[in-house]
Image (spheres, grey):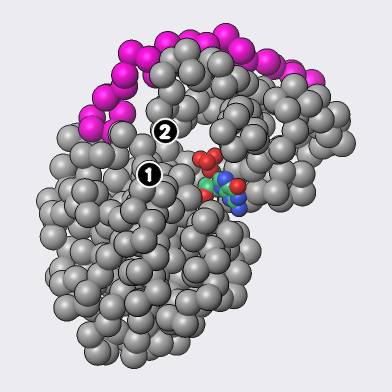
Amino acid sequence: MNAETTSTVKKLLATQKRIVVIGHKNPDGDAVGSCLGLANFLKQLGHDTHVVMPNDFPDFLKWLPGCDQLVIHEKDTSRSEALISEADVIFTLDFNSLDRTGDLQQILKESEADFVMIDHHQAPDDYAKATYSDITMSSTSQMVYHFMESLEGLNKVNKTIATQLYTGIMTDTGSFRFPSTTAMTHKVIAKLIEAGASNAQIHEAVYDTNSPERMKLLGTALNNLTILPDLHTAYITLTQQELDAHNFKKGDTEGFVNYALSIKGIYFAVIFIENKQENIVKMSFRSKGSFSVNDFARNHYDGGGHINAAGGRSSKSLTDTITEFISILPSYKNELTHVS
Ligand code: 5GP
Ligand code: MN
């Protein structure tokens, strides 16, 4: 974090504040881990701190220390709105635009609190008094570690914070394999293990607690895989009916798209997931090398994210969404053929 941002944050935190830390809608491991870790740190500094999430988080994170203290707006609407409207300082973590908070965006836009953004997504909006944005970072959880470092607070990294941040870094880096994983990421991870994060236990808690239904749903997803070899693209579809038949729960499809990306010669992978409740098709985009799914999602699907991982949505039917996708793809043939 640069000197100017550090100084702004130090001034904001110089006296005791009412603080709310907020993650994005459909929070993932990085959103939950970074918010919990930061909140733990701010509490140790003496601030009255709460974490609010727009909606619930997946079961594979429900073992995380401190996650029972999260206030979920969708379930606990009046409490989360009261916390936000009474806050002096609001930290927004792991997203770059207030519209990523779903139903919370209006109340956040109306808030007079001072905002601090900590985030690693491309093209951050300019709403915060202090913006700590770095798109080269593996995860927001790694940035929370550097944030504490800038405030000379690394002595506050206890086993709980170490576990929360380790989980966020691990899940956002695909277990330290994506290109965003740097030597610095590993140095931070080493410090977190020294501070008490139990790496083997965390991997097991996140990855080895699959339900039988999720495994069967993966079977359906792989069965629905379509490969377009000439366009170096593979995609998976899941209908609402298929989700219902496998007792779908939030987080069950996490990582499915990576199977499509793991095929030899495939540089672009998509999963289309029908959501009848919201009347949309939710998409996850993944790529290898120079093909930017952030641009693709922004240009066509009201979405965004990172170069190699992004999301978006369509309000067309699932069939029409796929037809449209297939019609768009050929205009990217050159980019998809010359991936570097
Ligand atoms: P996922 O596919 O795992 O949901 O998301 C991949 C990445 O894209 C994450 O960093 C996530 O924050 C971002 N992302 C997912 N959906 C959206 C979206 O609708 N809009 C934007 N701007 N980013 C998204
Ligand atoms: Mn993240």
The relative height of residue 319 versus residue 84 in the rendered view (above or below) is above
Query: Whole-percent x and y of residue 241?
Result: 56, 16
Q: Secondary structure at mark 2?
A: loop
Residue at 35% from the left image edge and 81% from the top image edge: 88
Q: Crowding near pointer 2: few (<14 within 10 Å), some, many (20+)? A: few
Amino acid at dot 2: Lys
* Residue bearing mark 2: 250
Residue 31's disc number: none
Q: In which quadrant of the rendered view does residue 329 lie? A: top right
Q: Crowding near pointer 1: few (<14 within 10 Å), some, many (20+)? A: some
Q: Are marks 1 and 2 in contact (CB under 8 Å)?
A: yes
For the C terminus, the image quarter is: top right
Residue at 46% from the left image edge and 70% from the top image edge: 117
Q: Secondary structure at mark 1?
A: loop
317 falls in the magenta region = no
The relative height of residue 66 versus residue 209 in the rendered view (above or below) is below
- Span shown in magenta: 204-232
Residue at 22% from the left image edge and 68% from the top image edge: 41
Is residue 141 among the parts visible in the rendering?
no
The reply to whether the residue tagged 1 has its Cβ within 8 angstroms of ligand 1 is no
Taking the image as shown, residue 32 lies to the left or right of residue 283, namely: left
Q: Nearer the viewer, residue 270 or 99?
A: 99
Q: Nearer the viewer, residue 319 or 161?
A: 319
Taking the image as shown, residue 338 lies to the left or right of residue 59, namely: right
Residue at 36% from the left image edge and 48% from the top image edge: 75
Query: Whole-percent x and y of residue 96?
Result: 55, 62
Taking the image as shown, residue 282 lies to the left or right of residue 148, namely: right
Amino acid at dot 1: Asp
Q: CA distance from mark 1 to mark 2?
A: 8 Å
Residue 56's disc number: 1
User: Which residue appears farthest toward the front when viewing the image?
Assistant: 78
